Image: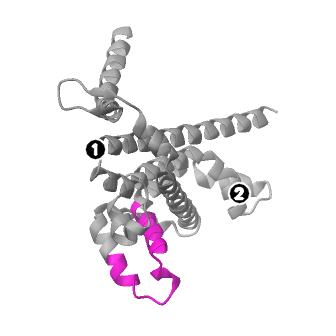
Amino acid sequence: MKKKNTAAVIFIALVMIYLLIPLFVTAVYSAFEKWTSLLPEHFQMIHYVQLLTEKDFLMSLLRTLIICVIPIALTVLLVLLALFVTTIYFPQLEKYVQLLCMIPYMIQGVILSVSIISLYAGSPTFLSNRIIMLTGAYCIIILPYIYQGIRNSMRAVNMKMLLEAAEMLGCTKLYGFFRVVVPNIISGITVSSLLAVGIIFGDYVLVRNIAGTSFKNVQVYLFLEMKHSSTKASAVFVIIMITTFLITLLVLHLQKRDSAKRSRKVKE
């Protein structure tokens, strides 16, 4: 048994090293002036200092965070309500809801962006706003990941039984759903949301086609910097990776703290 555990740990360590090599090499490259021979030359951190004090880059990072949070929050809320209705009132429609939520898997970013622009660009309503269109496009792209994560979590906790117990204590179905079921599936919501964060942070096609360079997020900023300096572009990439890593740590920490609070309340 110990030999099997040791082999598993070694295998996982090798996989992690293999996956982290590109990030490590990019970080090293960004910290030097050039790397045209066997070893990099002229160590410097000037690009990081410039980026962290440059208003244009910080604003692009802020725009990315905002355009990341809003679609995820909207999609999570809509998926929760859709699964609540189909599970409790119309279980026969769940397979159709699942089919609709899986369709975005087959839609390429270019096709989606062109279709949205063609449909809404000339609309006299607020839907013609480029940021609104971009938010809707992100909601569509992340829908399969959010739906699948929440759906699997609901099946794992036996939502119907929890709601029946809540109703016995005097709660309505909707109140019991958000006060009893949702806290029990928060881990699934968290994992799905973090996956959606990675997708939105890595997107360039949708934001470039729909909003253009006028809405400069980190990916647009990265693309523009690649034309001028590859080392600075590498520094931008490293900061993006560190930002997503910090977001993940923060969300997981908040989730762990919330779980600890609920455990203490149960014990009391």
Looking at the rendered structure, the kind of residue marked 1 is: Ser
Q: Earlier in the sequence, mark 2 or mark 1?
A: 2
Alpha-carbon span between mark 2 and mark 1: 53 Å
Which segment is the magenta one? 115-141
The residue indicated by pointer 1 is 230
Which numbered marker is on residue 16?
Answer: none
Query: What secondary structure is found at the residue carrying circle 1?
Result: helix
Pick the residue in front: 119 or 170: 119
Residue at screen point 71% across, 57% down: 176
In the displayed image of the protein, which residue is found farthest to the right? 268
Residue 164: percent from left, percent from top: 68, 55
Q: Tell me how many marks there are.
A: 2
- Residue 203 visible to an observer of this rendering: no
- Give the left or right position of residue 143, taking residue 109 as reference: right
Residue 244: percent from left, percent from top: 47, 43
Q: In the displayed structure, would residue 266 be above or below residue 177?
A: above
- Give the left or right position of residue 10, taking residue 142 as reference: left
Residue at screen point 68% across, 63% down: 174
- Give the main secondary structure, helix, strand or loop, of the magenta stretch: helix
Looking at the rendered structure, the kind of residue marked 2 is: Gly
- Give the left or right position of residue 176, taking residue 130 as reference: right
Give the quarter of the figure containing the C terminus.
top right
Magenta stretch: includes residue 134: yes
Residue 212: percent from left, percent from top: 37, 69
Which numbered marker is on residue 176?
Answer: 2
